[in-house]
Amino acid sequence: MSDFSCWFCKQTIEEHDVKAVAIEISNLWFSGENQPIQSFWAHSKCAQQNLSGGYIFDPDDLINPQ
Ligand SMILES: [Zn+2]
């Protein structure tokens, strides 16, 4: 069973969504060994739709590095 829920639509992310993503967010300016990081998860489709702003985000890039 998966405990991951989507950051955007709040629905459970099923394992068949093989391109689902983990999103780690940290402060841009504070860097160091103990830098706090928050993790979120998202369906591949939700990530593609919601993270494509200034550039096109494609979950395929994470599993098929070019
Ligand atoms: Zn979603």
Image: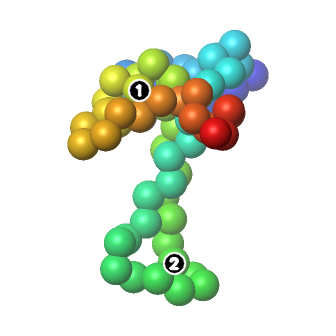
Please tell me whether residue 24 is drawn above or below residue 64 in the rendered image: below
Residue under the point 50% across and 65% down: 37
Q: Percent from the top left, x then y, of residue 48?
A: 41, 26
Q: Position of residue 20 (x, y in %)?
A: 58, 28
Which of 10 and 25 lies nearest the eye of the viewer?
Answer: 25
Q: Which amino acid is tagged 1? A: Gln
Q: How many marks?
A: 2
Cα–Cα span, label 2 and label 1: 27 Å
On-image quarter of the N terminus? top right
Q: Quadrant of residue 51?
A: top left
- Please name which of the two marks, 2 or 1, marks the residue nearer to the observer: 1
Residue identified by numbered label 2: 35
Would residue 61 be seen by someone viewing this image from the given angle?
yes
Q: Secondary structure at mark 2?
A: loop
- State the mark number for residue 27: none
Q: Residue at x 51, y 24 (%)?
A: 43
Secondary structure under tag 1 reads: helix
In the rendered view, would you say 27 is above or below 5? below
Ligand 1 closer than 8 Å to label 2 CB: no
Image coordinates of residue 41 in percent, x first then y, are 52, 37
Asked whether the viewer can see residue 5, the reply is no
Question: Which comes before the other along the chain, label 2 or label 1?
Answer: 2
Residue under the image location 35 percent in, 72 percent down: 28
Question: Depth check: 39 or 54 in front?
Answer: 54
Q: Residue at x 57, y 82 (%)?
A: 34
In which quadrant of the rendered view does residue 46 lie? top left
Residue holding disc 1: 48
Residue 51 horizontal side relative to residue 19, left or right:
left
Q: Is residue 37 above or below residue 13?
A: below
